[in-house]
Amino acid sequence: MAIGRIAWVPVLFLAALAAGAFLPLAIMALPGAGGEIAEALGDPVVWRSLRFTLVQALLSTGLSLGFAIPVAVALHEMRDFPGRGLVLRLFVLPLALPQIVAVLAIVGLYGERGALSRLVESAGVDFPSIYGLAGILLAHVFFNMPLAVRVALGGLSSMPAEYDRLAHQLGMGFAARFRHVLWPFMRPALMSAASLIFMLCVTSFTVVLTLGGGPRATTLEVAIYQALTFDFDIARAVLLALVQVAVTAFAFAMLTRAGGEVSAGLTLGAMRPFATRRNAIAGIVAMLVIVVGTVFVAAPFVVVFWRGLAADLSGLAAQASVRSALATSLVLGALAAVLAVGLALTLALGMARAAAQRGFTGTPSASERLLGQASSLILVVPPVVIAAGWFVSIRRFGDVYGAAPIMVATINAAMAVPFAFRLLAPSASSMMERYDRLCRQLAISGFARLRLVTWPLLRRALLLALAFSLALSLGDLGVIAIFGSQDVQTLPYLILQRMGSYRTQDAAGLALILCLMTMALMMFADRTGVGSAEARTS
Amino acid sequence: MHRLLICLLSATALVGLSRAALAEGTLTVYTYESFTAEWGPGPQVEKAFEAECGCDLEFVSVADGVALLNRLRLEGGRTDADIVLGLDTNLTAEAKDSGFFAPHGLSDVSVDVPGGWSDEFFLPFDYGYFAVIYDTQAIDTPPDSMEAFLNGDYGKIAIQDPRTSTPGLGLMLWIKTLYGDDAPAAYEKLKDRVLTVTPGWSESYGLFTAGEAPMVFSYTTSPAYHMIAEDTDRYQAAAFSEGHYMQIEVAGMTTKGADNPLAAQFLAFMLSPAFQDVIPETNWMLPAAPTSEPLDPVFGKLVQPAEPLLFAPEAVAENRKAWVDEWLQAMSR
């Protein structure tokens, strides 16, 4: 019961963060806001942006999942090919890449003068332009398909090994096995990924404008940014942000209804060893799918690496600003990650407790669903709104400069909670299912339980969640760009700053450094996690 | 993790302490962040002014000029800034109406910007002309007028969105000042020339230098950077016979700064050679007052516009929203 109540802490924290953004702005805008609200709601541009936002987000989500399913199944089938761990780590990298870097890399491949486009055109075939909906979808699939693969694999790894064995003993073909064995475990995981991807695409900004080819491709996020910057029309910004949250919440409700329980999450998935007999053709097809998926995700990184290597890397590393940005990124990222994982763990344990109370059967209660889903909505509250709102409050009562690093870490943490939660939820749930009763019978509670039960069982997931959150916070720009002063310069901030002053080479070098750093963090998290998992089974 | 936390907390505390210790004789200047970057004018300006005044000059930087004005608005008049440096003439009318600024009170200043300058609140520190920059390896004969650019087929251009970017607003105002009520028809022609419309200058310039687009919308001074810093004259500006739209960057004294004698001293310093000498090769804009020595010869090779074009600040403040909507309508068709 106690843990159940504690789970409200992260929810309240996230709610307070959002309220703390909206309230001061609403108070500021209140005088004479009535007319503006009517004007904003009657504006055809707003409705057009909203429609485009939803259409591209739905298509992006659908495509990301559509491509993720075969890749995830192939990675599940070929669970013992040597490069698997590397592929899985690669699939975390897109999250850490600032959008502008990714967009330029994608253009370097598929653009008018892109490497691939020129290759195809030299063969005499017309390569379609990426500017328009196609480019937006391509970029969103690059960002989100790998995420969906990791989530789907998480779902599959919670499948008991006996299922696979039984399916083979029954002589099921692939189609039957997919339908009766794999899909039931993937579906909830994919639904969980879908909600996350949908939100990420709803708030997409740089990708949509740059690759959209013109202002017809505009998301609501652009209108909110415009309202809060050039127009300084707070009432309109707040209103549009609320519309964005409400519409996403509605889409969630529909999704949950269609997808059933959304409980699975992301794990690296320690595969129980089971030698499946495969026929050669299926093996080749699976390998092909993996290769195509990996090349698609890796190619933009090859561009990032290629461009980065042309930069003066040692010169960059010697610059004081780069060093301090690296340190700032790591410190703020680490703080954000620890906070995010703490909040997500509380949330996941609370959910697991609630599931335990209904004996892990039946439908989840309203409060469970609220805990799981509402907390994710923080992702669609525009960072510009959060930063502006909190700036107004802090300005009134305290020192903005001192608060800047804390706010950056806090907001980044909040944005990472939905990811960390999805990583921790399945492990927390299975831990509760297996050991909760035992713990209570043996009267293990409090710190002892944390040390003896929770930590050993969740260590792997916790470290992975930590690495994910850190990667996310490292790549973040939204918050820093507004709150940041010269005291708080992170690596992505520096990348943007150099790109804004003709220093494209430097920016490319810094992007490479950011990628390498994230990759190193991923390896560290996976290694440490795997070590503990092996210790557990022995 | 504990150690990290302690590091962070003590760093925060140190910043607070140093602020308190230097509270006497301090001038706080809000500016945009590329001004204070290590290669920007900020470091040199700070050193020179601190030597002159024997005080402490402190920069607080935000993303861009628009963010500067918004920072003041979010602060609701209780600002730390004595000086705000980096607004442009598209923002000065709104800035004046906000009531956050005080008249500068300087009478004999040697401002030298095309079209002359008289404004009791703001003083210019640099200016530039917008231009279509082209890649000489992709385009042999660039367009020689806006009319030719809009009607001809020279290749694609990467431009910026006037809803989110200052150069984007500049292009829109340029076309508006040339075409007036016929602007929507001109925007529709522009639409066919455009590869993509990016949220900021960085994305479009990145696309341009990556070879993705043979033209980009930027400043006449952009080639100067490539010629001086990278020693290449591959990228050049196209001179348009109708004249080029201007951007004048200004600074003003806040009502708080009016009580700080250092503020007026800084504004006078801003128009002296000590400040102006730094501008061309750090901010890549043209000086708004005499420099002590002639500029690098490269600046002589830049496009010298036939006519400077600029809307009155009041006209922009009054019509910007309607004009952006008009742009949006035409470009979305």
Image (tube, grey):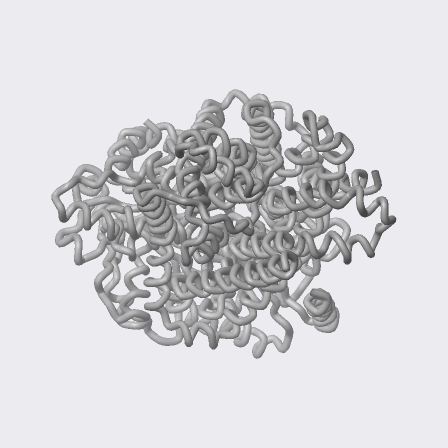
Q: Is residue A80 visible?
A: yes
How many marks do you count on the picture?
0
- Quarter of image, res A188: top right
Task: Give the answer, above or below, for where B168 lies relative to A356.
Answer: below
Work out which residue is located at the far right of the displayed protein and give it: A443
Q: Is residue B80 visible?
A: no
Q: Toward the viewer: B189 or A4? A: A4
Residue at horizontal 46 percent and vertical 49 percent from the top: A275
Taking the image as shown, residue A28 lies to the left or right of residue A89, namely right
Taking the image as shown, residue A413 lies to the left or right of residue B34, namely right
Residue at horizontal 16 percent and vertical 52 percent from the top: B139
Q: Position of residue B254 (x, y in %)?
A: 62, 55
> Which quarter of the rendered picture does the N terminus of chain A lie within?
top right
Q: Toward the viewer: A472 or B265? A: A472
Residue at horizontal 34 percent and vertical 45 percent from the top: A283
Q: Toward the viewer: B302 or A323? A: A323
Q: Position of residue A329 (x, y in %)?
A: 57, 62
Q: Position of residue B137 (x, y in %)?
A: 17, 58
Q: Position of residue B39 (x, y in %)?
A: 45, 69
Residue at horizontal 53 percent and vertical 71 percent from the top: A323
> Which quarter of the rendered picture does the C terminus of chain A lie within?
bottom right
